[in-house]
Image (cartoon, grey):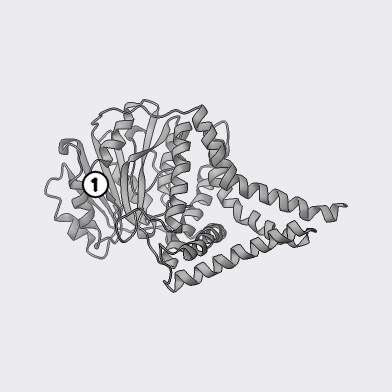
Amino acid sequence: MNGRTALPYFLFYISAAFVLYVYVGYPILLSLWSRIASRKAHKSSYELPVSIIIAAYNEAAAIERKILNLLELDYPASKMQVILSLDGPTDGTESIARQYEFDTARMQVLVLRHHGGKADALNQAVEQTSGSILVFGDARQLLDRAAVRELVANFQDPTVGGVTGELMLVDGSGKESGDAVGLYWRYEKALRSMESDIHSTLGATGALYAIRRELYKPIPVHTILDDVAIPMNVVLGGKRIVFERAARAYDCVDNSTGAEFTRKVRTLTGNFQLLRQMPELLNPRRNPVFSQFVSHKVGRLLVPYFLMLLFLSNPFLQGTAYQGLFVLQCGWYLLAFAGAILTIRRASSPGGRMKGLALFPYTFTLLNWAAVVGLYHFLRSKPDAWSGRAAAELSDIA
């Protein structure tokens, strides 16, 4: 076998090994690692003063429900400050929020007159905080009554600099979603839980997370993923970000193909941006979770290109086994195409076995294509498309 004929085999096996490591090998490694070197946070009843920050743009349809949800949290009112940081809303969000500003020591509405983006809204809100713990959330997700209490309990451990809650994706009946997106999200949360047990998660869920006030570093105005940049600043500062399953936020699965794809593109674009803004994340001497970051975050950005190499090199390989693998790859992408058709036509059913089989390849393929489009958007540098409400949408599943 000469060099020319060996090249397709090399590309095929390297690509297969990379994809399998990112989605199968890395989880197995995490499982073994977390069992051998587990570092679970020490929790206890702890009631530190907290400042809850909700950054929002045009959220007239959701802001009142969110405010009422926050006011019903099981946490001492004297130790809880709520700041609604409104990023130049134009739909009446401000007037609705002002109705609840009857106790400014507890509820404060901060209105930015110029629409500068979520990162700017967060930075300005933090300047108004009085609590020693900052709790961040979005307007659309509702919190469990004990969510903040469960987050704060982890700060009894001095090694903990931040805590992320658990985002529960629910279907129309209020149960945890069992469709392709829901299953993929459960897989993602399992990874975060194991990473937390070893050292730290690689970010947080934007729906609910908290950090120590003194660890907050202002983030660049056009930052896309505040829920990764802020926690990773904490990790680079020498503290841990842990995953707390008992602190829950709830959101409904959006069956809109366009909305789902837009969120994925935004998230993956944000990962590329993060590498530019925080190059120290790729420095093993500076980043204590370097191997996890490269395996989880960077690996996901590279998988689409290895999938392409896997597919394109396969036809050049000789042998029945290789032909069979090529047929399997073709079948996978045909299922993905079928899933796209089912989703577009809204003909899928969560309980349908065959439809579920079609939708998982579709979800997986869509996610990886979003990484390619995300790189394109990053290279075009269009920060205006990522501010405001788009920045507050569900973006964890990537």
Observer-nearest residue: 8 or 301? 8
Q: Is residue 39 above or below residue 130?
A: above
Question: How many numbered tags mark residues here?
Answer: 1
Q: Can you see residue 128?
A: no
Query: For this rendering, which residue is in front, 40 or 360?
Result: 360
Residue 346 in picture, x, y percent from top left:
41, 71
Q: Residue 231: x, y in percent?
A: 42, 40
Of 361 and 379, the residue lying toward us = 361
Dividing the picture into quadrants, the one containing residue 240 is top left
Q: Residue at x 51, y 50 (%)?
A: 271
Is residue 207 placed above or below 316 in the rendered structure?
Answer: above
Q: Name which residue lies at 27% across and 40% down.
A: 148
Residue located farthest toward the bottom when viewing the structure as drawn:
345
Q: Which residue lies furthest to the right in this view?
A: 2
The reply to whether residue 122 is visible in this rendering is yes
Q: Where is residue 104 in the image (x, y as percent from the top left)?
A: 15, 45
* Residue placed under numbered mark 1 in the picture: 83
Q: Quadrant of residue 393?
A: bottom left
Q: Residues within 10 Å of mark 1 (few under 14, many from 20)?
A: many
Q: Which residue is drawn at 56% across and 66% down?
A: 335
Furthest residue in direction left, as rendered: 102
Amino acid type at circle 1 is Ile
Question: At which x and y percent is residue 226?
Answer: 41, 47
Q: Disc 1 on helix, strand or loop?
A: strand
Q: In this view, does 108 lie above or below 237?
A: below
Q: Is residue 182 left or right of residue 324?
A: left
